[in-house]
Image (spheres, rainbow, N blue to C red):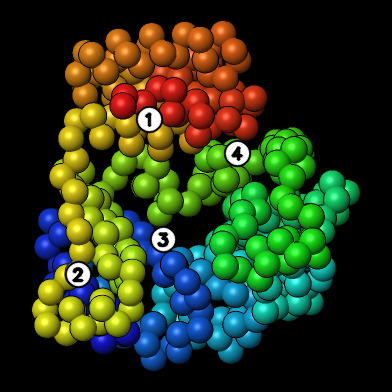
């Protein structure tokens, strides 16, 4: 797989033109299980074929049980300067429900170790809306997270994927089904908690200390070009979007023949408008009238017309030269975006 990844980097070296890389993100699975040898090889290949900005944000997603002090020291030595740690919860019952391999103690130790070796840019992942977690439990989880000197938090409502152990247990009645009302209430608690701490709720699922918003993910929401490498990876260069085949074996066989196994979609003006609305509204910056006007006058007229009712309903509010979601609107972000899309 690493052979294929480094070869795809070579094959894709011209995808972004001359754009220097402002961020590099190791994610989409559990990259922290890779040895330093393989991570280093991938990093060396990136530097060989791309220009990397000085001070670029270089993030590694990691499971808490992978982050020993030795591992962390080796990651720091290879220029990784930001960690996204999948804690999910500090409660053992929650972790069992989600079939996580780590314990609450390992979650705490991974964070402690990371700060001890000198990592200062750390994102922590939490899950809310769990059938094993009351509102009081969720508050305790948030308190434990903010007790650490983290500067970024990603929080997601629990989703039950088919063919998982959790889906099986819910069908059997071992656990109750996910309650959307509980998830909505705990999301509200999170927004209030983060606001009281002075954090910026800069994207529906992401919170940060002011100035510490993740550069990598922010680039997605602001429509900047990016290149994804590996099975299932998506890429975007403002004119087209492409995505690699998901199957590992198919991916590796194609790359070995010098072929990138991807599908490509050329984006129409309507698709670009819809994507801007969908991603822009998720952020604290919202959607700019000036940017929408660039798609054409009919798009601006449509956007303003459809927004009237959403403003009356308290879902949107005018800010600067555009519209942003209100506190209430953040609960209905997908529906609001859908109402403003052209179909």
From this viewpoint, is residue 239 visible? yes
Label whose residue precedes the other's in the sequence (1 or 2): 2
C-alpha separation, residue under disc 3 versus residue under disc 4? 19 Å
* Residue at figure coordinates x 59%, y 25% from the top left: 329
Q: Quadrant of the C terminus?
A: top left
C-alpha separation, residue under disc 2 versus residue under disc 3? 28 Å
> Mark 3 = which residue?
57
- Secondary structure at numbered mark 1: helix
Pointer 1 with pointer 3, Cβ within 8 A: no
- Secondary structure at numbered mark 2: loop
User: Residue 318: image x %, image y %?
Assistant: 49, 14
Which circle, 4 or 2, is nearer the viewer?
Answer: 2
> Mark 4 = which residue?
200
Q: Residue furthest front?
A: 172
User: Residue 102: image x %, image y %?
Assistant: 70, 78
From this viewpoint, is residue 87 visible? no
C-alpha separation, residue under disc 4 versus residue under disc 2? 39 Å
* Residue at figure coordinates x 50%, y 34% from the top left: 334
> Mark 1 = which residue?
277
Label whose residue precedes the other's in the sequence (1 or 3): 3
User: Residue 220: image x %, image y %?
Assistant: 37, 47
Task: State the mark number for residue 261.
Answer: 2
Pointer 3 with pointer 4, Cβ within 8 A: no
Pointer 1 with pointer 2, Cβ within 8 A: no
- Secondary structure at numbered mark 3: strand
Give above or below for 61 relative to 289: below
């Amino acid at each position: 797989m690493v052979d294929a990844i480094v070869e795809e980097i070579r094959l894709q070296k011209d995808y972004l033109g001359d754009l220097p890389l402002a961020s590099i993100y190791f994610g989409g699975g559990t990259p922290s299980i890779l040895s330093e040898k393989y991570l280093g090889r991938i990093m060396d290949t990136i530097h060989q074929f791309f220009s990397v900005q000085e001070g670029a944000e270089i993030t590694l997603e990691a499971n808490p049980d992978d982050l020993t002090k030795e591992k962390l020291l080796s990651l720091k030595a290879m220029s990784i300067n930001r960690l996204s740690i999948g804690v999910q919860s500090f409660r053992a019952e929650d972790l069992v429900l989600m079939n996580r391999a780590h314990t609450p103690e390992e979650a705490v130790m991974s964070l402690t170790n990371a700060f001890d070796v000198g990592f200062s840019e750390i994102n922590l992942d939490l899950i809310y809306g769990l059938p094993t977690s009351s509102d009081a439990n969720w508050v305790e989880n948030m308190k434990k997270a903010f007790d650490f000197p983290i500067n970024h938090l990603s929080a997601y409502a629990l989703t039950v994927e088919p063919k998982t152990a959790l889906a099986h247990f819910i069908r059997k009645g071992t656990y109750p089904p996910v309650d959307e009302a509980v998830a909505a209430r705990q999301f509200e608690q999170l927004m209030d908690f983060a606001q009281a701490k002075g954090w910026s709720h800069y994207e529906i699922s992401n919170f940060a200390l002011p100035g510490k918003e993740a550069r990598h993910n922010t680039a997605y929401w602001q429509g900047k070009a990016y290149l994804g490498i590996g099975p299932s990876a998506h890429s975007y260069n403002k004119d087209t979007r492409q995505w690699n085949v998901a199957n590992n074996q198919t991916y590796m066989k194609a790359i070995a023949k010098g072929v990138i196994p991807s599908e490509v979609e050329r984006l129409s003006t309507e698709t670009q408008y819809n994507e801007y609305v969908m991603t822009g509204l998720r952020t604290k910056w919202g959607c700019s009238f000036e940017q929408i006007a660039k798609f054409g006058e009919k798009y601006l007229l449509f956007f303003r017309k459809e927004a009237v009712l959403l403003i009356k309903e308290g879902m949107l509010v005018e800010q600067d030269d555009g519209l942003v979601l209100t506190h209430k609107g953040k609960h209905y972000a997908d529906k609001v975006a859908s109402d403003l899309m052209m179909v």
